[in-house]
Amino acid sequence: MDLHRTTLLNQMDYNRDSKDEKAAQSTEERLDSGLDSLKEEEYQAVADEIRQLHLSLEPPNHQHPPAAVEEQPEWKTQTTEDGDTLLHLAVIHEAKDYIRSMVDVSRNTDFLDRQNDLRQTALHLAVITNQADVCQHLLASGCDPTMVDNRGDTPLHIACRHGNLLCFSVLTQYSRTQHLHTAMAAYNYDGQNCLHLASVHGFLSLVENMVELGADINSKEQHNGRSALHLAVDQQNLSLVQLLLKKGADANLLTSGGHSPYHLTYGYSSFDIRQELYSRTNPALRDLPDSESDDSEEEEDDKSDEEVGYDDIHWNGH
């Protein structure tokens, strides 16, 4: 019994050979604290608890040799001049066997979220290359779907921009609920979220799915305050306008310039869109601001170009 206790004291950094009387006194005090009255099995249980506490809460003044750091295999540290890991390259070249092998041995590790020089993860590249099965494997293995690339896009942004329904389905089904909501609400560096991207490009099924999954149908672009409904009108997409109104889009939201979706119908020939919006729009928001006070036709044209046409705005770099 004494042998076991001495071993425990050594592991807890009480040095039997120390000539420091205070250290010796401290050791004796701990031995006299009631441990001698415990049975062997009770003592060992206490000793194990103390040992675990000691290992997890290391006092800063104790000097211990650093724990050995497990070295990563060489293939995990290799990168190209573009910052691509071997996993990036395997995804780019659709080398399915290599992808599966590397992902399987890297489950729930940071390696799956390594970014190249464009800040793309393997999941970004899997969406870009339309490999829904790889997306599923990566998500099931613990990758983070909220990582953003150098445009501020998550993989879900990319799927919405390109109308990639298969990858969109995998991302929304296999992402954790918190991650999914984070990705849907995130704005990229153009100030657009996933719903805006799907609306701009007219992907009705993606818009409908995101709204049903909890996306904010009335969220506004950060740069100019347009909602998905504004974008649908500006794209003259009657089907999307009808879908958004059916799903509860607010026809009275104003852009940063003070324009309702109905205002954006001016200058367009689509009577059907005007009709869809007319009854849902507050009468005070049907006429263009200050339109009756413009005496000059030239001034009216200039105002129309500035407020309605958005000719000087580029979406997604185009």
Image: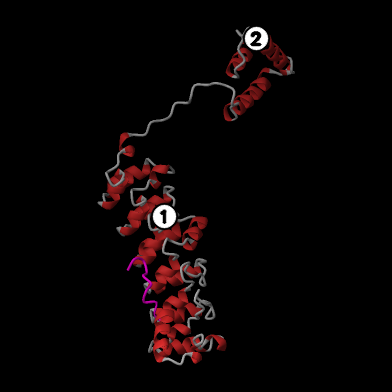
Which residue is drawn at the image coordinates 52% and 68% (left, top)?
Answer: 216
- Which residue is tagged 2? 20
**Residue 201 in the image: x percent, y percent?**
36, 72
Q: Nearer the viewer, residue 128 or 44?
A: 128
Query: In which quadrant of the rendered view does residue 307 lie?
Result: bottom left
**Residue 281 in the image: x percent, y percent?**
54, 85
Left or right: residue 302 versus residue 180 is left
- Name the amino acid type tagged 2: Asp
When the figure is inspected, residue 223 is found, relative to residue 307, above or below; the finding is above
Q: Name the quarter where the N terminus is drawn.
A: top right
* Chain part drawn in magenta: 309-318
When the figure is inspected, residue 137 is found, relative to residue 63, above or below; the finding is below
Q: How is the image coloured?
A: secondary structure
- At label 1, counting other C-alpha atoms closer than 10 Å, the crowd grade (few under 14, some 14-19, many 20 or more) is many
- Which residue is tagged 1? 148
Which residue is drawn at the image coordinates 41% and 64% (left, top)?
Answer: 190
- Name the amino acid type tagged 1: Val
Q: Nearer the viewer, residue 311 or 161?
A: 311
Which residue is drawn at the image coordinates 32% and 57% (left, top)?
Answer: 131
When the figure is inspected, residue 113 is found, relative to residue 285, above or below; the finding is above
When the figure is inspected, residue 1 is found, relative to residue 157, above or below; the finding is above
Is residue 37 within the magenta segment?
no
**Residue 260 in the image: x percent, y percent?**
50, 81
Is residue 315 within the magenta segment?
yes
Which of the two discs, 2 and 1, labels the residue nearer the N terminus?
2
Mark 1 lies on a secondary structure that is loop
Q: Is residue 233 visible?
A: no
Q: Name the quarter where the C terminus is drawn.
A: bottom left
For the stretch drawn in magenta, the main secondary structure is loop
Q: Nearer the viewer, residue 187 or 170?
A: 187
Mark 2 lies on a secondary structure that is loop
- At label 2, counting other C-alpha atoms closer than 10 Å, the crowd grade (few under 14, some 14-19, many 20 or more) is few
